[in-house]
Image: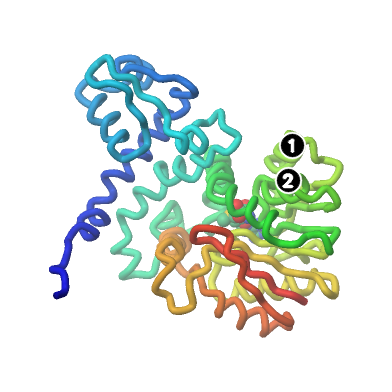
Amino acid sequence: MSQPPDPSQIMQVGMGFWASKTLLSAVELELFTHLDGEALRGGELQDRLRLHPRATYDFLDALVALGFLERDGEGSDARYRNTAETAAFLDKQSPTYIGGILEMSNARLYRFWGDLTEALKTGAPQNEVKHSGKPMFEELYSDPAKLEQFMRAMQGISLGNLHALAEKFDFSRYETVCDIGGATGQLCTILATHHPHLRCTSFDLPVVAPIAERTIAAAGLSDRVAAASGDFFEDPLPSADVITMGLILHDWNLERKKQLIGAAYEALAEGGVFIIIENLIDDARCENAFGLLMSLNMLIEFGDAFDFTGADLRQWCAEVGFRSVEVIPLGGPTSAGVAYK
Ligand SMILES: C[S@@+](CC[C@H](N)C(=O)[O-])C[C@H]1O[C@@H](n2cnc3c(N)ncnc32)[C@H](O)[C@@H]1O
């Protein structure tokens, strides 16, 4: 006999914004950073985070129930601690902090997604450009605080995927890498650290270069990693054995995607390789929910930009002359698409 339908998934996703916003507010308030190696009472956290007494224990105990805090004891004497995961990923003191993407989601995307229905009906972006009509990066980067916030968001969302790429792809046959749209230079510093024979260049808009130079210097890698500036639609890409693009193609419409793939092909040495890192949607478009939701996020951010499948990538790469394309899962929803010239 078949089971009667169960409404729990409907309720969990439909009311998921409660849990989502509770976690995002905890990141905004730097709760997990305040708990750096400590176990604090509710009253101490209330003072440190300047919470209203009405809110303190509902907030903290909800985070316990959601699995983001551990609690020893009950009542006002109970002490709250980070879990292993929040200590590693949401404490700003941790080298594996990924909260930047949640900081930006809290400050920007949470509200913009409130207009999803309008985006679904109009196909138009719902972020800062909704009223200004300016290109997205021009609008965002005109505010230095938003530029820094976007850079921290990219560091957070990409950290694990870029380490996975450094481990899973065989870089031993190549000497030079150019990461196009490299933001803080994160991929280049990770690759140069994992593979001491590589020389890497992180290419991004001029306003981003000082941020990349800072990160590269802080990693002590200025002898093997350089920051280069340019506009990837106007300027030729620096040539290299390996051209990488992490979360770049999904920011653009089909014509721009094909332009970037063609530019990568031109910049590669014969025998070179083009690697994209994206939340590649499964070819049947029914499994990778994060990839499909990321594509809706591209609707919110850019309008005509979209995420895509491995089959789409194969077709576009074949059109410009690449010999073959393989897809390497990087863990979770993300994959590397690797195209050989
Ligand atoms: C979504 S972020 C991806 C950052 C990084 N690759 C990652 O995977 O985390 C897109 C990057 O493309 C850069 N970008 C946007 N338009 C550009 C252009 N016309 N020329 C060069 N870089 C550009 C942005 O500054 C930003 O760093």
Q: Quadrant of the image for the N terminus?
A: bottom left
**Of 209 and 86, which appears nearest the observer?**
86
Helix, strand or loop status at disc 2: helix
Q: Is residue 324 shown left or right of residue 54? A: right
Q: Quadrant of residue 4?
A: bottom left
Q: Which mark is residue 159?
A: none
**Of 37 and 239, which appears nearest the observer?**
37
Q: Is residue 202 shown left or right of residue 117? A: right
Q: Is residue 319 shown left or right of residue 56? A: right
Q: Which mark is residue 189?
A: 2
Residue hosting label 1: 219
Q: Is residue 154 above or below residue 29?
A: below
- Residue 244 position within the rendered picture, expressed as x and y whole percent measured from the top left: 70, 62
- Residue 24 position within the rendered picture, expressed as x and y whole percent measured from the top left: 38, 40
Q: Is residue 153 above or below residue 126?
A: above
Task: Name which residue type carries label 1.
Answer: Ala
For image coordinates 28% across by 48% down, the residue present is: 17
Q: CA distance from mark 2 to mark 1?
A: 7 Å
Look at the numbered discs 2 and 1 and tell me whether their residues touch, using CB distance below 8 Å.
Answer: yes
- Residue 47 position within the rendered picture, expressed as x and y whole percent measured from the top left: 34, 15
Helix, strand or loop status at disc 1: loop
**Of 338 and 185, which appears nearest the observer?**
338
Mark 1 neighbour class, 10 Å CA radius: few under 14, some 14 to 19, many 20 or more: some
